[in-house]
């Protein structure tokens, strides 16, 4: 059995897991309002941690290293999202 190229593997991950998860999260925002925001954040975090986990498995990281990378990626993703939210609120307050 021939190994699958990394580009095909990452495309399968994005098409198979990441995009439906993100679309589901954004649909939940439109459907449920505030609860949808929580769902979208959780869907985004799931997508980020899944991709980080798969990259760690591809690079033969230990299980502990994969978990640490997943935790760090969650922290940076949440802090970046919070930064964008604060910047958006600041710009919105400047207009009014």
Image (spheres, grey):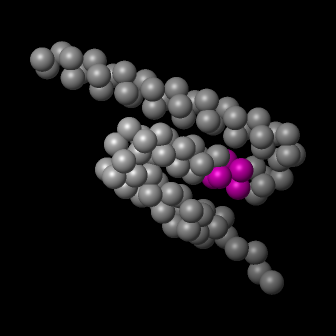
Which residue is found at the position 43% from the left and 24% from the top?
83
Q: Residue 92: where, in percent of width, then height? A: 21, 23
Q: Is residue 28 left or right of residue 21?
A: left
| Residue at the extreme bottom | 1
The quadrant holding residue 13 is bottom right
Dominant secondary-structure state across the stretch colored magenta: helix
Q: Residue 55: tell me if it is visible.
A: no
Residue 74 sits above or below residue 60 on the image:
above
> Magenta part of the protein: which range?
50-54
Q: Residue 78: where, in percent of width, then height? A: 53, 31
Q: Nearer the viewer, residue 53 or 46?
A: 46
Q: Residue 18: where, in percent of width, then height? A: 53, 58
Q: Is residue 54 left or right of residue 23?
A: right
The quadrant holding residue 24 is bottom left
Q: Is residue 82 left or right of residue 74?
A: left
Q: Is residue 81 magenta?
A: no
Q: Is residue 86 left or right of residue 17?
A: left
Which residue is found at the position 31% from the left and 50% from the top?
30
Position of the N terminus, as image quadrant, is: bottom right
Q: Residue 80: tell me if it is visible.
A: yes
Q: Is residue 51 magenta?
A: yes
Residue 17 sits above or below residue 61 on the image:
below
Which residue is found at the position 71% from the left and 50% from the top?
53
């Amino acid at each position: 059995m021939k190994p699958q190229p990394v580009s095909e593997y990452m495309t399968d991950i994005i098409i198979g897991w990441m995009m439906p998860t993100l679309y589901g999260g954004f649909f939940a925002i439109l459907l449920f309002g505030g609860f949808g925001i929580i769902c979208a954040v959780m869907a985004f975090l799931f997508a980020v941690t899944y991709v980080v986990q798969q990259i760690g498995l591809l690079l033969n990281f230990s299980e502990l290293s994969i978990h640490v990378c997943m935790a760090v990626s969650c922290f940076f993703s949440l802090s970046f999202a919070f930064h964008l939210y604060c910047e958006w609120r600041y710009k919105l307050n400047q207009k009014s």
